[in-house]
Image (cartoon, rainbow, N blue to C red):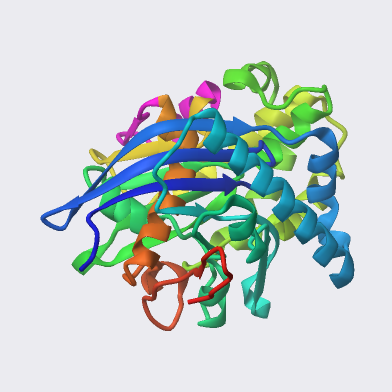
Amino acid sequence: MKKYQYNIIGVMSGTSLDGIDLAYITFNCEDDKWSFEVNCTDTVGYSAEWREQLRGAIRLDSQQIEILDLRYTTYLAAVINKFISANDIQHIDAVCSHGHTIFHKPELGYTLQIGNMPILADMIQQKVVCDFRVQDVLLGGQGAPLVPIGDRLLFSEYDACLNLGGFANISFEGKLNYRLAYDISAVNTLLNEQVNKLGLEYDDKGMLASKGQVNTALLSELNALDFYQQSAPKSLGIEFLNAYVNPILNKYTLSVEDYLATLVEHIAIQIASGIGVGVGQRVLVTGGGAKNEYLINRIKAHAIGITFDRPTDVVIDFKEAIIFGFLGVLKLRDEVNVLASVTGAKYDHSSGKIYDYFHKNY
């Protein structure tokens, strides 16, 4: 008989390298309707050393990646154990972890998230559900975005869910209960890189961007990138920035404020163009970018008539950790947690790996 209440720790590390998000959540299913309560949360920021290692991992060979994977898994275990201890968490059905993406090239048939080694279960002495993307890529999917099943089942009161994290992605219900979702553009991966030049982690409320001037030539080049003309399903990774965006940015010599203003305008235009919903509809906005007031105002300026709702700060900051926790619950129940309509896989499926302390892999 299936359980209908689950106490879960969701763990997420995004491409923007802000840190590791952890959320202890209770999920309840009643009359086939899911709800959740967030009990406690934390974000553990990366040290400068870890941030540099993760940013540079894309250049490592396979043996170096294996060493990094073990080191990162060990580090992740320590972070999770500290979270459990600090919050005196007694009842855990599973720890559901995304890991950290190093490579994501679904068109070539592979994706890699480190921190998903079986030894993680031993190190934290908990059942672990992890490595959610690989199976989808093997089934011909993009391996992303994976949060739409959570959008459908946990946030159904909204017409669409927009996440402004390292990359922007949108999720909404199409015709005949057919969920659509895709990545739209880079967001915090681009903006944070600019403010890092000033020794800052992020542009607080978009204040720096609001002081800059939009460079129309740079804006035109960015908006002309082929990715924006592609049909869904489609997804983005750091490779897109390295191969296409950064070479354009490097052609210009602008102040940080002007770069930020231009990038914000570019992001706002692409989101308004790719959002998939129309006038009078409600969009839930989460992710770190939801706190960038200047970015939100520029999106509203280009997406006239659409209501953008900010939830509580806990949901803004920890939505992905919450949903990856939920993906783990669905995997434990052997229920669909990845939608083929979203990723382009051959069929809906229940993705992820389950590790018990004794390394049994289901």
| Quadrant in which residue 48 is drawn | top right
Q: Is residue 47 above or below residue 334?
A: above
The location of residue 80, given as percent across then percent down, is 59, 43
Confirm whether residue 344 shows in the render: yes
Q: Residue at x 74, y 60 (%)?
A: 239
224 left or right of 251 in image: left
Q: Residue at x 24, y 59 (%)?
A: 3
* Quarter of the picture holding the N terminus: bottom left
The location of residue 187, given as percent across then percent down, is 61, 41
The location of residue 29, given as percent across then percent down, is 20, 52
Q: Residue at x 43, y 55 (%)?
A: 147
173 left or right of 16 in image: left
**Range of magenta residues:** 292-312
Front residue of 68 and 144: 68
Specify whether residue 62 is painted magenta: no
The location of residue 234, given as percent across then percent down, is 53, 65
Q: So how many labels did they put on this image?
A: 0
Confirm whether residue 61 shows in the render: no
Q: Is residue 315 above or below residue 120?
A: above
105 left or right of 70 in image: left
Q: Is residue 310 above or below residue 330?
A: above
Front residue of 210 and 109: 109
Q: Residue at x 48, y 68 (%)?
A: 233
Q: Is residue 227 above or below residue 138?
A: above
